[in-house]
Image: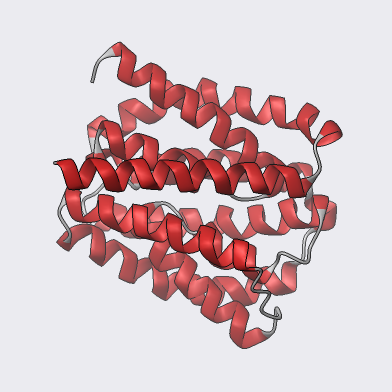
Amino acid sequence: MSWADYAVIALAVFAAAGLQASIGFGMGMLAAPIIALVDPKLLPVSIIMLALLVTIMVTARERSELDLRGAGWALLGRIPGSICGAWLVAVLPGEGLSWLVAATVLAGVVLAFLGWQPAPRRLSLVTAGAASGIMGTATSIGGAPMALIWQRHQGARLRGTMSAFFMVGSAVSLAALAVAGAVTAQVLVLVAWMVPAVLAGYAVSRFVNRFLDARRLRLLALSVSGLGAVLLAGQSLLG
C-alpha cells in the first residue's frame, strides 16, 4: 500500500474509533467499507483487532454502568456465530467479502432507520449475539444486531454494555480467525500503524460526549456508513 492509502485508512479509523467510544458501536460500519476500498484482504481481522483496543478502554471507563446479565446472554450466541463467520472468511473470495460488507452495512442502516425495537429478552439476546458473531467475524461489522437490541439503553450504559460484549466477542472472533489462517503479517503491520489513530479517536470521544448527544452521533454513524457501503458496492460493480 502507498502512504496515501495509509493516510486514508488512518482518517477512517480515527473517526470510527471516536464513534465507537461515543455510542458503543460503529467502528466496523464506518471504517470497514473504507478499508475494503483500499484492500479487501485486510478485512475483517484489522478492524476486529482495532475495535478490541477501543472496547477495552471504553469498558474500563464505563464499568459501573454495565448490563452484565444482558451481555452474558448475548455472548452465549456470539461464540457459535463467530465460528460460522470464520468459516465464511475461509471460503469466500475478497470480492465476495466486499459484497457481504456492503450488504451487511446497508441492512443494518435500513433496520435502524425503520425503528425496529425488539425487546431484550433471553431468546432475542442469544439470537442477536449469534447474528453479531457471524457478521462481526466475517465482515468486522457486528454492531447492528446488538444496537437494535440495546437501543433503549442510553449514554454510559449503552456504551459500556456494548463495549463489554464486543470486547469478549472480538477476542473470540480473533481466535476463530487465527485458526482459519486469516491473521497475516500484512494485517498486523497495518494494525500497528493504526494504533495512534485509535488512541486519538478515543481521546476525542471524551470531549465529543459532552457536546453531542447519542442520537446525533448515531445518525452521523449510520449516514456515513450507508455512504461507504454504497461506494463499496459501486466499486465492486465497476470492477
Q: Quadrant of residue 40?
A: top left
Residue reaching furthest top?
3
Q: Which residue appears at 66% of the width and 57% of the height?
A: 162
Q: Who's the residue at 29% across and 35% down the image?
A: 37
Whether residue 41 can be seen here: yes
Q: In the rendered view, would you say 65 is above or below 200? A: below
The correct choice, above or below, for 165 with respect to 213 in the image is below
Q: Is residue 155 left or right of residue 203?
A: right
Residue 79 vs residue 208, the one in the foreground: 208
Residue lying at 63% horizontally and 39% vertically, measured from the top left: 19
User: The N terminus is located in which quarter?
Assistant: top left
Coloring basis for residues:
secondary structure
Residue 26 appears in the rendering: no
Q: Position of residue 195 (x, y in %)?
A: 49, 26
Q: Is residue 191 found left or right of 72 in the rendered image? A: left
Position of residue 186 relative to residue 229, above or below, is: above
Q: Nearer the viewer, residue 60 or 222?
A: 222
Left or right of 227? Residue 168 is: right
